[in-house]
Each structure stands twice: as structure tokens, then as C-alpha cells.
Amino acid sequence: MIPGSQKDHPSFVRSFAFALEGFMTAVKTERNIKIMLVIGAAALSLGIVLQLDVISWIIILFCCGLVLHAELANTALEAVVDLACQDIHPLAKRAKDIAAASVYVLSCVAAIVGCLVYAHALGWV
């Protein structure tokens, strides 16, 4: 498809199908996505057990969504770098390492936020 062209442009519903296909591909092929989904499910389960209030749910869901988004974006960036650079190149490594670091930083912040939310729900903070 030519950028800006309406010819052969997928429908709105078909675009969602492509997104779902991308998500499922990431889940099937990327170990870190699986780990993040398990941790996210644990965070949601703990929220149910602790009967979080609405604001706490918003915070937990937002953190889970941001971490998944970051990992998906990192996975996509790594695929594009691999496509563009077949050989080992210092700039390719740099781009991939920095993208991975962004996921790491966000994951650490989300974990701290989650600990604070759950500590508050338990009356510890």
C-alpha cells in the first residue's frame, strides 16, 4: 500500500485484527512478554483479593498497560533493527540496548508504584 493511498487500505475492524495478530505473535515468540503477562495477572489477582478502590485500580491497570506497551514497542524496534542491519553493528546494539533499558526503567517504576498501592491497601502506608 502506498502511504496516503486509500486503495487497499484495511478496514477499521481489519486493523484491530492485525493488532491482535501482532500481540499474539509477540506472546508466542517473546519470553519477556510472557513474563510480564504473568506478573500483570498476579498484580490484578492481588488487586481483587485486596479489593482495591477505583483510583488504585486505575493506577495498577495503567502501570500494567504501560509496561506491556513498552515491551511491545521494544520488540518491534528490535525487529526493525534486525531487518535493517543483518550484521552485528555497534549502532544496532546501542539502539536495542537503549530500548531494552527503557523497558527496564519503566518496569522498575511500575513495580515501585505497585508496591506503594498494595502497601496502602494493606494499611502499611
Image: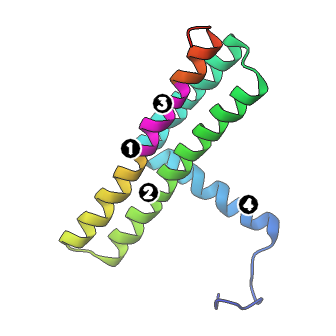
Q: Please, what is the three-letter code of the amino acid marked with disc 1?
A: Tyr
Query: Pointer 2: residues within 10 angstroms few (<14), some, or many (20+)?
Result: many
Q: Residue at label 2?
A: 74
Q: Which residue occupies the foreground of this view, 36 or 119?
A: 119
Q: In this rendering, is residue 79 above or below 61?
A: below
Q: Which residue occupies the foreground of this view, 119 or 51?
A: 119
Q: Is residue 67 left or right of residue 62?
A: left
Queried whether the magenta region covers residue 29, the answer comes back as: no
N-terminal of the pair, mark 2 or mark 4, is: 4
Q: Residue at label 3?
A: 111
N-terminal of the pair, mark 3 or mark 2, is: 2
**Distance in Å between CA atoms under marks 3 and 2:** 19 Å
Q: Position of residue 32 (x, y in %)?
A: 42, 41
**Distance in Å between CA atoms under marks 2 and 4:** 20 Å
Q: Please, what is the three-letter code of the amino acid marked with disc 3?
A: Ala
Residue stretch in magenta: 105-114
Q: In this rendering, is residue 68 above or below 113?
A: below
Q: Residue at label 1?
A: 104
Q: Residue at label 4?
A: 16
